[in-house]
Amino acid sequence: MLEGPEHGVYFRGKTTGKVIVLPEYWTGLVYEDSISVNLTSIGNANLHFVTKIEDNKVHIDSESGDINAFFVVNAERKDVEKVLLEYRPIT
């Protein structure tokens, strides 16, 4: 279980294409402006990066133009109340 300052969801996988299609239910579940993406190159050092996020899709590219990466997409849920963080040290 992950803990953080938000109710988050993630989507992960592996891709060789330039578009990661997010699950259809994400459109009503997450704030689009909260989406973050981590890309990890597979097989060789090749910088992968996000070019844009729109219409429930993450568009990516790489230095070489070849895509071969693992991905983790995180976002904040919008269907629940915001998290109220309160820290109480153990004494």
Image (cartoon, rainbow, N blue to C red):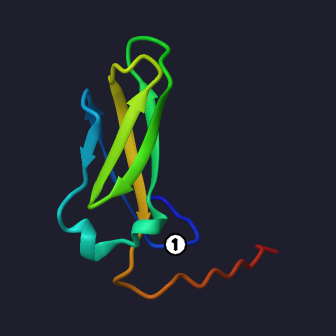
Quarter containing the C terminus: bottom right
In x, y percent, where is residue 28? 26, 76
In x, y percent, where is residue 79? 34, 83
- Residue furthest out toward the top: 44
Answer above or below: position of 63 versus 60. Answer: above
Give the quarter of the image for residue 42: top left
Answer above or below: position of 50 versus 41. Answer: below
Answer above or below: position of 34 versus 19. Answer: below
Would you name the residue on which mark 1 appears? 6
Tell which of 86 and 7 is nearer to you: 7
Which residue is located at x 25 percent, y 26 percent?
16
Q: Is residue 76 left or right of residue 59?
A: right
Q: Is residue 89 left or right of residue 77?
A: right
- Residue furthest out toward the right: 91
In x, y percent, where is residue 17? 24, 31
Q: How many marks?
A: 1
Tell which of 90 and 2 is nearer to you: 2
Q: Is residue 23 left or right of residue 34?
A: left
Quarter containing the N terminus: bottom left
Q: Is residue 83 left or right of residue 19?
A: right
Label 1: few (<14), some (14–19) or many (≥20) C-alpha neighbours in 10 Å: some
Answer above or below: position of 42 versus 84. Answer: above
Which residue is located at x 45 percent, y 73 percent?
7
In x, y percent, where is residue 65? 37, 21
Q: Which amino acid type is marked by label 1?
A: Glu
Q: Secondary structure at mark 1?
A: loop
Which residue is located at x 42 percent, y 16 percent?
64
Tell which of 26 and 10 is nearer to you: 26
Give the quarter of the image for residue 40: top left
Which residue is located at x 63 percent, y 80 percent?
85
